[in-house]
Amino acid sequence: MCKTYQRFLETGIDLMPLGIERREENISYFCTPKGATFIGWTGVDGIHYCFVRGFGEKVFAVSPMNGGSDCVHPVAENFEDFLRLLMACGGESAIEQAWQWSREQFDGFMEENRPTDEAKAAAEQIVEKLGLEPMDDPWGYIMQVQQGFDYTRIPYSEDYDDEDMNPDIQPEEPEWAVYYDGSFWGHSGQDKAGEEVPVGKWFEWAGSEWVIPAVYVCAKGLVMDFCMRAEPEKIRAFLDHWQLDPETEQEREFTQEEQMQIDLDNPLSFDIRPEVVVNGRRLTASHGSGICYIPGMRREFDRQQERVVGHYHLDPEQGWTISRWSFPWVTSRKPAIRELSVIMRQERRNIPGPHFTANQPGDTFTFDCPVTGQRHTLTVQDVQADEAASEREFMPGMEFPTHYRMMRYTITPELPDGAVQVFDCAESDQPRRIEPVPPENQYQPQATNCCSIGIIGGADGPTAIMVGVPEQGNVQAACSSLHFEPVEQIEWRLVFREEPCGERTVGLL
């Protein structure tokens, strides 16, 4: 037993005002390390603090409700520092949770949870009887204790690996394997894993640093991983600008235009459509998947990202966008690769444009196009109200909006195909229930988002259609969102489609 802890026990100081209660009976949890000497309990969720045999005076926080491998964390190098942390934080709660927080989150918690008078009185007893002072930088100290700590050394009982006792425990990492019909999260079918061929090709393109670490030769085709580096400073600036928290961003609601701008601003967002050339023959990708790695993020679902970064020996202090593409062979058999190169192309980006109203034939709207750098004029040729067929037969008991307006228009000077699209600013009305769902259909999934009927609707609202009336030139049409009642006035918006950088061919083998 360490001398400071022995002296503390002799003083009779009660740590209960600081959140830690001593008990005569200490019952181990599935995640309590073997050889633990109990310091005290918080009285909530089985959280307790202890020393662990083999780690000297180091103090550990044990949090059974964290589950998996996040149940136990070192919080202090010795009991003296642990008391100084309690004094600085006014209690144990911030200490136990610091492992998952940034400095800003830690400071915010401290600001909202000021020490009670009882906690201050307990801290004064520690100062008076043990001569200790509060820790100057509690968050920085805890991070230093936890950084580089080898968690695999913590001894556990057999209960720790029992899925019934610890359902969140991560299974042992499988061997590294890449499949043609797979993604970063698994694969389907019975195909064998591809043969990994190291490449390690670094190059600059589109203002970023890239590396193709390896390719995988499979029976059906070639699999290639593309890694783009993103500076952590730019990632932090992006998250701060949009006030994004990766843990809660799914709860935020953004307009479609905000989502487009977020994609443009995001340093980790970069869509590619590569082709590979094997022995002089071009292979077009059939499918792909992607992940993003953000340095400093310690989320449960980031384990695969960390695994990929580790396998390819990428710098963990940098951000990475990693995409995996599968290219089917164009020959009847898997070829012997003598020459290999890749053609890098970037997908077009959506750029939010101005709004306008045009509801009568002859109405015009003039705008500057970032794709051409020119001024163009949209002229309305025709506006018609129409009604789409109902989808009630597909979802009994639900009523779908059917009313929309179609606007036909021309743009002069003409734009390249797909350079601009016209959308309704309003969202489609949500489907609504009109009668009880029949018992045989009550467990079927229900619609919660805007519906799509034919060419109308879709993930980004209405879509433009090429009508092609010869005497009028390239007449296009845009359909409004769907509504239950006819709508007379529509506010439209433009979306520009830009291909921002040219292609580049990179030799690999």
Image: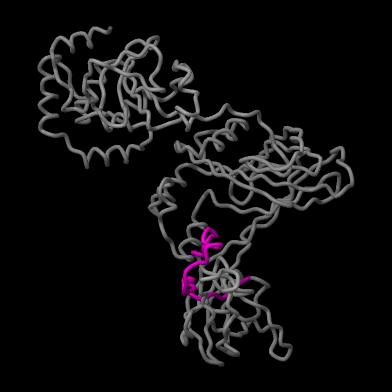
Instruction: Indicate the position of residue 91 as horizontal and vertical percent values.
Output: 21, 29
Check if residue 412 falls in the magenta segment.
Answer: no
The answer to which image quadrant residue 440 occupies is bottom right
Instruction: Indicate the position of residue 137 as horizontal and vertical percent values.
Output: 27, 29
At horizontal 45% and vertical 65% (from top left) the residue drawn is: 255
Q: How many marks?
A: 0
Q: Is 86 situated left or right of 362 in this image?
A: left
- What type of secondary structure mainly makes up the magenta span? loop
Q: Is 140 situated left or right of 367 in this image?
A: left
Which residue is more in the foreground, 385 or 164? 164
Q: Is residue 492 above or below residue 237?
A: below
The answer to which image quadrant residue 42 occupies is top left
Instruction: Indicate the position of residue 459 as horizontal and vertical percent values.
Output: 56, 65
The N terminus sits in image quarter: top left
At horizontal 48% and vertical 57% (from top left) the residue drawn is: 262
Q: Is residue 208 above or below residue 355?
A: above
Instruction: Indicate the position of residue 344 as horizontal and vertical percent values.
Output: 70, 51
Residue lying furthest front = 439
At horizontal 52% and vertical 84% (from top left) the residue drawn is: 365
Magenta stretch in the rendered image: 419-448
Residue lying furthest right = 332
Q: Is residue 498 above or below residue 369?
A: above
Which residue is more in the foreground, 231 or 277? 277
Q: Is residue 286 above or below residue 82?
A: below
The answer to which image quadrant residue 279 occupies is top right
Which residue is more in the foreground, 284 or 191? 191
At horizontal 50% and vertical 65% (from top left) the residue drawn is: 449
Which residue is more in the foreground, 307 or 475? 307
